Image (cartoon, rainbow, N blue to C red):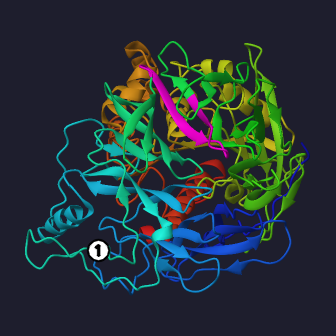
Amino acid sequence: MTDQTPSFPFGSLDDYTSVPRIEGIALSPDGDRAVLTVATLSRDRTAYERALWEVPADGSGSPRRLTRSVKGETGAVFTRRGDVLFVSGRPDAEAGAGEDDVAQLWLLPAAGGEARAITRLAGGSGSLAAVAERADRAVLAAELLRSADSLEDDARLRAIRRSKKVKAILHDSYPVRFWDRDLGPEETHLLALDLDALGDQIPVPVSGRPEAEGDAPQNPYPPSLPRPRDLTPRPARSFGTDASISPDGATVIATASVPDGLGRRLLLVSIDVFTGERNTLVEEVGVDIERPRISHDGSLLAFTRTAKSTPTAPTQQEFWVSGLDGSDARRLAVDWDRWPVEVAFAADDASLIVVADSEGRAPLFRVPLDGGPVEQITRDDFAYSQARVDAVTGDVLALRSSWVEPPHPVRVHQDGSVTPLATPVPRPQNGGILTEVETVVDDGVRVRGWLLLPDGASAANPAPLLLWIHGGPLNSWNAWSWRWNPNLAAARGYAVLLPDPALSTGYGLDFIARGWNAWGERPYTDLLAITDAATARADIDASRTAAMGGSFGGYMANWIAGHTDRFDAIVTHASLWALDQFAGTTDSSGYWKSIFTPEAMIENSPHRFVDEIRTPLLVIHGDRDYRVPVGEGLRLWSDLADRHAAEDGSTIHRYLYFPDENHWILKPQHVAVWYETVFAFLDEHVRGAAPRRPEELG
């Protein structure tokens, strides 16, 4: 690759958090227009507000803002007529005042005029799961209370819980949490919405709040408003947003899950939209079937098949295609061992368009249905996401990013050439130079990563090194992250190493297997080896180094702390500390217990090496983290204090705690506090600066 120089306001955290962010892209059926979801910082600087912008899809013209509201708009999708559907919690003047301001589905007409709400769901409309290409029908994924018999009954039960201020949840199955939210008492239902039922009459206002306990609310669906039809009443199986609808709007293929020990197993269900009849389409014991995609002509179904991993080895994510009824299933790309991030049918239905991690990038690929070899479409240094196929030209619209350029909209032509689209978001300013580094480790495997050098780094002025370890661990440092942004460290004079050690995606199954059931072995030695390669450069100061990471990266930071004192400081965020404790308290304990043997879980647990820690640690955790529960951070902090505190209780270590954040620190004001605390800690121990703390921390 060629060196790239970013330009962005990285020197000021206030300026950085103020930069607008493109989060989504939708493509009109005729391929002429794209709608972008853009997030901007609120006036009080404590949240992001989202709006929809329209841009020409051919790279010409200028952006035009479509929506404005305090609550914002997300999830934009075009209907076959060119109307824009979106989800928003904005007030609906036609429905009457509400206490909850739950998000509903809105429609912005292609012909112009004001947007109008087209759902009145007591628990909100959730998100759009699919929209038919040749029919006026959409499928919503919405939450209904488990015992509700109808939409009206759901409103009644919610009113009872609200009036009595009950938030308790009674579970009868596992799991009970997911990432940062509690599961229940709702279940996800798939609801069909007939858009051709929209009339011109203004809906009757309905509050959905009974005057007396147990009274049913008035019918929230007058004739002018399309009534959603529940395709999954009393679902029994857990449905999500991973669904596809046939072009004629008659059939929905959805991913459902069923209990599988302490975990869940994914399968495909076919639903007749008119009769509600449900049939299991593809299911295998010990296998996850997911990502259902229906071809443009409605005759084919594509999906991925992944056998459950065991402690022995990871398994491949396979591409399959069949008839719409699941018949004549056959595997594609048998010899290709990349893992798909996104899958869609090409415009001619002769191939699949796939996004997959590869060599520190995430290119677009073409997977032929005739069994031919996989073709790489894009060959630049970017990661692509949200690929939308233009059914007219066969081109692909997507968001594209790298570590020097945040997500921006582009059109990818069939020959792989790329045309950037107009955007309301300015290109960044200021930053360092991004280059690649690599080394060959002792088992003969190449380990590579990105190195971001600060301005002015040279043999005469070498920069201190910050080793930044990615989470996952099935992940890769290949795309821009607003949350984990190395450019902020580079702006403060640090060279930032972003390596992909064993377990990283984009290098094949064997590369992942090198660290399987042995997190403390190859991933650790890979990280030290590529750090050696980076510090051997003349523009890096090998005598001033630090390491940090979050989630799995935090695990590795803890492991490093207990196995070497080569780093001057270590930052560990949302980190795994005691694996046996973690495996029983995380939101998905079945998975973690299935990929480790009991012996390996003990052997690879960082807590066993607390007595060997010599490096100052900054421990960071959010109380609402359900993936790596806060107990991990609390136990780490307790163990550090028990082993390393002075007689007066003081310690060189620090603990930054966020009572109202989760696995990620998302609130803009807390993001600033996070970075200020991290940089102060690094400056103190790497550069010898005086200790300091952000004013907001008192």
Q: Residue at x 87, y 59 (%)?
A: 419
Residue visible at 23% across and 50% down in the picture: 146
In x, y percent, where is residue 414? 86, 47
Q: In terms of depth relative to the viewer, which is nearer, 305 or 434?
A: 305
Instruction: Name the dominant secondary structure of the magenta segment.
Output: strand
In the image, is residue 697 above or below residue 684?
below
Residue placed most toward the observer, 529 or 3: 3
667 to 471, vertically: above or below: below
Residue 143: x and y in percent read 33, 56
Left or right of 145 on screen, residue 655: right
- Residue positioned most to the front: 275
Residue 278, image quadrant: top left
In percent of the image, x 59 and y 31: which residue is there?
Answer: 323
**Bounds of the magenta segment:** 284-304
Q: Residues within 10 Å of mark 1 (few under 14, many from 20)?
A: many
**Quadrant containing the C terminus in the rendered view:** bottom left
> Is 292 part of what is drawn in magenta?
yes
Does residue 623 appear in the picture of this structure? no
- Residue 366 point in image, percent of width and height: 78, 37
Q: Name the residue that disc number 1 marks.
A: 220
**Residue at (79% x, 55% y) in the render:** 454
Q: Quadrant of the N terminus?
A: top right
Q: Position of residue 439 (x, y in %)?
A: 80, 26
What amino acid type should be assigned to the residue bearing mark 1? Pro
Query: Is any part of residue 245 visible from this angle?
Result: yes
